Image (spheres, rainbow, N blue to C red):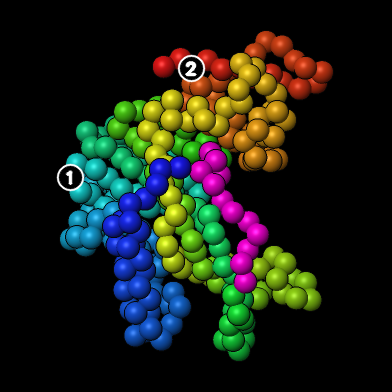
Amino acid sequence: MTEISLADKLRFERICSEMLSADRERDSIGMYQEKRLHATLKRYFCPDTERHEQKIGAYTADILSDGVIYEIQTGSFLPLKKKIAYYLENTDLRINIVCPLAHKKWVSWLDPETGDISARRRSPKSQKARDALPEIYRISELMPNERLCVTVMLLEIEEYRLLCGWDKSRKRGSCRYERIPISIIGQDSFCLPSDLETFLPPSDSFTAAEFSSFVGIKGRKAYHALYALQNIGLICEANEKRGRARVFCKTYKE
């Protein structure tokens, strides 16, 4: 994880504060089209709002500044695939996909019937840069490309969830309503295959289970992470098995 300078941390917190003040004037939480997390990161990467929402051929980029397209993606990367492919094929611009993750998260519950908001509580979950791998899989066929980069932002976030679930507490199966950034903790950029080598186990070959244990990603997401690394060219499937388990081996050499 790359450390963030004090100046950038303070700048990010200032932007968060300004966005909070704007919300208070509206007397609302997220009651406007663009969600707070998305809007805050746009301001952080490019304070000049004249460079936001720039039309580029068939698509509109979140930011176009100094020859770089920034796409702030707070959800799945899948809807971005055609857009990024278009940029790569039809422009000579560099593309930076910004992926925010909740390294530290506070959760509050919003009752949609009364409007009451519970006191916030710290979530035990902590996302790390590795958690971007299953999403990178969605666009991994476009990588590696010297013009395409993924920047992971590790943030402290306050999350509001609706009490709309199906169990007695109304929390199971609930919906996320809004995510409000509080501070920035760290940042990682993945532009070259070598930038992703840190997620590979130390041995030259390994099973999916061994990879999952090493990187800390489980279930289907672990396979998505593996396929991302395979599409990027860091690993390949070996012509052998360990019991019933498939074996992957490293292929990338800088």
Local SS, label 1: loop
Residue 180 is situated, as x and y percent measured from the top left of the image, at 46, 68
Position of 169 with respect to 78 (left or right) is: right
Residue lying at 49% horizontally and 21% vertically, measured from the top left = 233
* Residue segment shown in magenta: 121-133
Local SS, label 2: loop
Q: Which amino acid is tagged 1?
A: Asp
Q: Is residue 27 magenta?
A: no
The first of marks 1 and 2 along the sequence is 1
In this rendered view, identify the residue nearer to me: 9 or 46: 9
Instruction: Answer above or below: position of 172 versus 5.
Output: below
**Residue 82 seen anywhere in this rendered image of the structure:** no
Q: Which amino acid is tagged 2?
A: Tyr
Instruction: Answer above or below: position of 161 versus 233.
Output: below
**Residue assigned mark 2:** 252
**Numbered label attached to residue 66:** 1
Residue lying at 59% horizontally and 30% vertically, measured from the top left = 226
Which quadrant would residue 28 be assigned to in this image? bottom left
Residue 212 is situated, as x and y percent measured from the top left of the image, at 67, 34
**Residue 71 seen anywhere in this rendered image of the structure:** yes
